[in-house]
Amino acid sequence: MNSQAFLDIAPDVQHAIATGRAVVALESTIISHGMPYPQNVATALQVEEEVRQHGAVPATIAIINGRLKAGLSHGDIEQLGRAGHAVTKVSRRDIPFIVARGGLGATTVAATMVIAAMAGIRVFATGGIGGVHRGAQESFDVSADLQELAQTPVAVVCAGAKSILDLRLTLEYLETHGVPVVGYQTDALPAFFTRDSAFSVDYRLDTPGEIAAVLKAKWAMGLQGGMVVANPIPAQFAMPLAAIDQAIEQALQEAKQQGIAGKASTPFLLARVNALTGGDSLASNIQLVLNNARLGAAIAVAYQSL
Ligand code: PSU
Ligand code: MN
């Protein structure tokens, strides 16, 4: 038995892979734990449509009835979105448990990369990646997303990382583990709701074709691991830094007071930041994900043409 025995690839995704067409993986924790219902479901469907409009086939990834899925039905997406935080958040370590019990799981960036790689998908678009949390010197809270980027050959297009994280330590960790961080048309690391931060990216690339060429070179020579492609939120949807910082500070305080730790930490912080900033941040969040879906599709198309 090999990994394919656990994996169901949707027919349109299978067809695209077999004929060398572009495919973009999408994650499902962003649906269950990253946004409120019903905007999470509407956004997930809109993101898939955005990928299609830009010449690629979307493959939203999750675990449904214990099967690894690359490509979900609308019913699957509705189920994940409606159940929200009741769905098991699945990172690499959780995969075999949800499979063995025939359960439902929403995949994080790490688990989505694992399943995308099994399916042969090289490009993945999402909102933000996990990283090194503030205070990690004490808590040791470092997202498994970073280790996955070090070992699994999938490029992750994101809007950087939310400043619920320590961006400086996140960059240091990625450097140590050999994960390149590319800025798309920017020299600064974007911080999710804002177009830049105090930190620089390793490499700035200005076209999807250049990014595809680097991916090709990396994997053709057998270098392991993925790449972070950081795509700044479109200027018209960026949030004022002060409002975001205040909400993040408050969310972090609440998490500390309530002793939130482990895998609950990121979902708690995301939900509190969403609640404290109201509809504004949700609108920005949706727009940056759509923006990443467009760039992901363009990179996947360029990659297939090489
Ligand atoms: N950051 C966001 N939105 C998200 C996530 C992170 O702005 O939805 C999700 C992603 O699925 C990511 C996960 O992989 O949270 C990271 O969780 P942890 O820090 O527990 O590894
Ligand atoms: Mn963590």
Image (cartoon, helix red, strand yellow):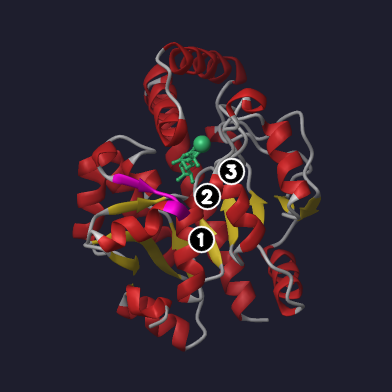
N-term-proximal mark, 1 vs 3: 1
The reply to whether the magenta stretch includes residue 218 is: no
Q: Is residue 58 left or right of residue 38?
A: right
Chain part drawn in magenta: 88-93
69 lies left or right of 290 = left
Asked whether the beta carbons under mark 3 and mark 2 sit within 8 Å of each other, the answer is yes
* Residue at far bottom of view: 19
Spatial distance from mark 1 to mark 3, Cα to Cα? 17 Å
Disc 2 marks a residue whose amino acid type is: Asn
Question: In the structure shown, which secondary structural element does the residue marked by tag 3 occupy?
Answer: loop
Between circles 2 and 1, the one closer to the viewer is 1
Q: Residue at x 38, y 27 (%)?
A: 271
Q: Name the residue nearer the viewer: 39 or 34.
A: 34
Q: Quadrant of residue 150?
A: bottom right
- Tell me the residue that label 1 is attached to: 113
Quadrant in which the C terminus is drawn: bottom right
**Label 3 sits on residue:** 159
Question: Relative to residue 47, is residue 250 depicted above or below?
Answer: above
Q: What secondary structure is found at the residue carrying circle 1? A: helix
Amino acid under disc 3? Ala
Residue 82 position by quadrant: top left
**Observer-nearest residue: 300 or 227?**
227
Q: Residue at x 77, y 44 (%)?
A: 201
- Residue on which the image places disc 2: 291
